[in-house]
Image (cartoon, helix red, strand yellow):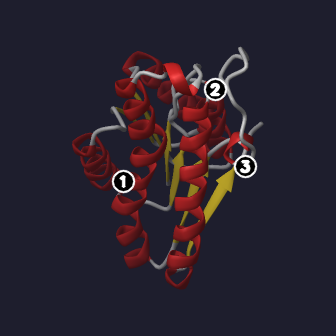
Amino acid sequence: MAIVTGASSGIGAATAVVLAAHGVHVVLVARRLDRLQALAGDLAARYGVRTLAVPADLSRRVDIDRLVAETLRAFGRIDILVNNAGLGMQGDVANLAEHQVRYLFDVNVYGPLLAMQAVAPIMARQGGGAIVNVSSILGKVVVPSLGMVGSSAAYTASKFALDAFSAAARMELASQKIDVITVLPG
């Protein structure tokens, strides 16, 4: 079974479809419950998998803890975590609002970190698992804000941080048979 965050649209929804098509039961997570419920119903009907829609703000530890508890109640295990939820931000360094940058880091960095911390002990007890962190090619290349949609030092910095946490977790969790994979769409 897999948890997919940011599942209400885009990469997250597409990932959930592929997993369900391969017979994987899926927990769909995002802030928009209506979209999650529609996708959950579609996946269950089309592929015969069990689904669960969980609305959550992944910048909040309480929501992550509730997500994990609901998943364990419904499925009894967690095999895969796809940390896909994320935000973009435009703006040059001199004009970024502090509260917006903090929220960006809460969603793009701390949310995935907290989710990894929540599921890793469960996966270790089960004998292994996989954590997939969806980052960006901008986690490898610095792109300043040059008026391009989605480009900013803050977004780039958040993806660099996610990549660093992912690399460290990959090394730290390998002995517990937990694979940590970073995907860099770009």
Measured as percent of width and height from the top left, residue 155 is found at 58, 34
What residue would you read off at disc 2?
10
Name the amino acid, label 1.
Answer: Leu
**Tag 3 or tag 2, which sits nearer the N-term?**
2
Q: Quadrant of the C terminus?
A: top right
Measured as percent of width and height from the top left, residue 63 is found at 27, 40
> Element type at marker 2?
helix
Quadrant position of residue 10: top right
Quadrant position of residue 55: top left
Q: Is residue 136 left or right of residue 78?
A: right
Name the amino acid, label 2.
Answer: Gly
Residue at image coords 42%, 76%: 124
Residue at image coords 72%, 46%: 184
Please indicate, yes or no, whether residue 52 appears anywhere in the rendered image.
no
**Tag 1 or tag 2, which sits nearer the N-term?**
2
Q: Residues within 10 Å of mark 3 (few under 14, many from 20)?
A: some
> Element type at marker 1?
helix
Inter-mark Cα distance, 3 to 1: 22 Å
Label 2–label 3 contact, CB within 8 A: no
Quadrant position of residue 51: top left
Please indicate, yes or no, whether residue 104 appears anywhere in the rendered image.
yes
Q: Residues within 10 Å of mark 2 (few under 14, many from 20)?
A: few
Question: Where residue 140 is drawn, which disc sits there?
Answer: 3
Q: Nearer the viewer, residue 144 or 174?
A: 144
Q: Is residue 126 left or right of residue 159?
A: left
